[in-house]
Amino acid sequence: MNSLDIVNTPGYFYAIAYWLGAVLVVYTSRRRFHGWRLCVLHGAFLAMIVIFMELTDGIAQVFFMPCMLVDISMILVYIYSCCDFSLSNAGYYCARAFITGEFTASFGWQLYYYAVRSFHLGMGVLSGMLFLLGIYPIVFGIFYWLECRIQKEKDIQITKRELLTVIIITVAVFLISNLSYVYKFTPFSSQFNSEIFIIRTLVDLSGVAVLYAYHILKKELQMKFEVDTLQNILNLQYRNYQLSQESIDIINQKYHDLKHQITLLKAEAGTQKSTEYLEQMEREIKIYEAQNKTGNKVLDVVLTSKSLYCQNKGISLTGVLNGKALDFMNDMDVSALFGNILDNAIESVEKLDNKEKRLIHLSVTKQKNFLSICVGNYCDKDLVFENGLPVTIKKDRQIHGFGLKSIQSTVKKYGGSVTADIQNHWFELRILIPAGVPMMP
């Protein structure tokens, strides 16, 4: 048995491991394609990376790093093509897939080397493939289980600084694990095959562990950021409600004073024309008296505040509102829920050039034992839906889309559900909450 043959891991061992590492990313993330298109991408990537690594197997040392960069570029392009990722996210997951593949291939080849030496297993492509088919499913089955537990429902958003950190970790792991192949006379390398394999496998395993730890930490920090942001939104909406209430109380006071003053002026009016003018003023302010009296004081304040804003922006805000259906809800939750609902709708329509399309309709009704809330508005954008809800189309998802997240969080407290759809440019957000159910802690 040639010593050189056993030291150099065949290209197909690494190629299939890289492919499986990338496929693992694709099937635990949000995908751009499904069905036969995705299968074509899988097959094309597998064929390209296997052929390339077999053709460059045993290449001169000077071409080793350029070839590795080509391998990594193929993994990056494949992940970016299949997954709904930004380029930073694709680079982050590419690094994780690459180190996962490195570990799996080195671990598989180490076990194969042990079987050849200890059990006199014949060397060859067939025996190598059979061994690979026995080891890889187990290793990637464990990785898939870990990814499913870690990924949960939320994708992470990677900054350029975080991407650079992961790239540095990946490069360091790769260089140290392959040091013995480049230069054997260092404190961190070996001249013996078994030790080379152990060093490479353990270093790659350490790299996988570090990247998983980094990933978990990133998820926890992002979760904390989202919780803090949602709490800040809740507090901000409630503070806006309090400020609006104070302003409306002042307006109400002035309104009642104005009613008495008009009555006095009518009694002292000297001409019929003056009387008619004062009566017209009285009719106009009675419109204000009748509006936004829903039966829930918090909803009244929020609607009055948003209605005044809509009037300034030329937005038509209409509604059928049974405020008493909200009596079982906390005041802070009511202000946050309707504040965010109307803010999202207003943001969607206020930039429309055609003022006739600046329409918002809100309904709050009680249907049997359920509170039903529906808000509709004209929308001229192409929305992307995920799990029945629109996904923010702004570039940085990490700092946008919290209005809808706050709505979901509030509704979830009461055991309700949120759904949305769009038909003929009319967007509707529907909320259904069991009425009278105590909120969840």
Image (spheres, grey):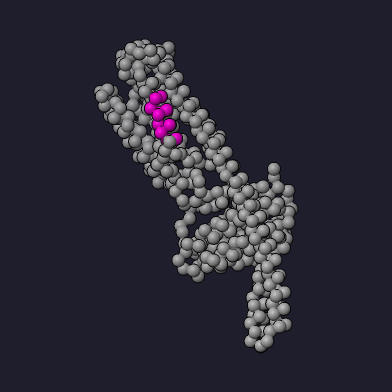
- Measuring from the top left, give residue 51's x and y in whole percent: 31, 32
Give the magenta-colored segment's residue range.
Answer: 162-173
Which secondary structure type mostly characterizes the magenta part of the structure? helix
Classify residue 61 by image quadrant: top left
- Up the image or down, 102 lies above or below 408; here it is above
- Residue 12 x/y as whole percent: 35, 28
The answer to whether 286 is drawn above or below residue 393 in the figure is: below
Number of callouts = 0
Find the residue positioned furthest to the bottom: 272
Quarter of the rendering occupied by the C terminus: top right
Q: Nearer the viewer, residue 279 or 35?
A: 279
* 302 sits to left or right of 116: right
Answer with the quarter of the image where residue 103 lies. Answer: top left
- For this rendering, which residue is in front, 288 or 317? 288
Magenta stretch encompasses residue 116: no
Q: Residue at x 53, y 39 (%)?
A: 222
Kindly identify the residue that appears in the image at 71 percent across and 70 percent down: 256
Residue 190 in the image, given as x and y percentages of width and height? 37, 12
Query: Quadrant location of residue 371?
Result: bottom right
Give the x, y percent position of residue 297: 70, 60
Q: Residue at x 58, y 59 (%)?
A: 342
Q: For this view, does 370 lie left or right of residue 200?
A: right
Whether residue 359 is visible here, answered yes or no, is no
Q: Quadrant of the N terminus?
A: top left
Q: Is residue 149 visible?
A: yes
Is 39 drawn above or below residue 429 in the view shown? above
Instruction: State yes or no: residue 168 in magenta.
Output: yes
What residue sits 48% from the left and 46% below the top?
397
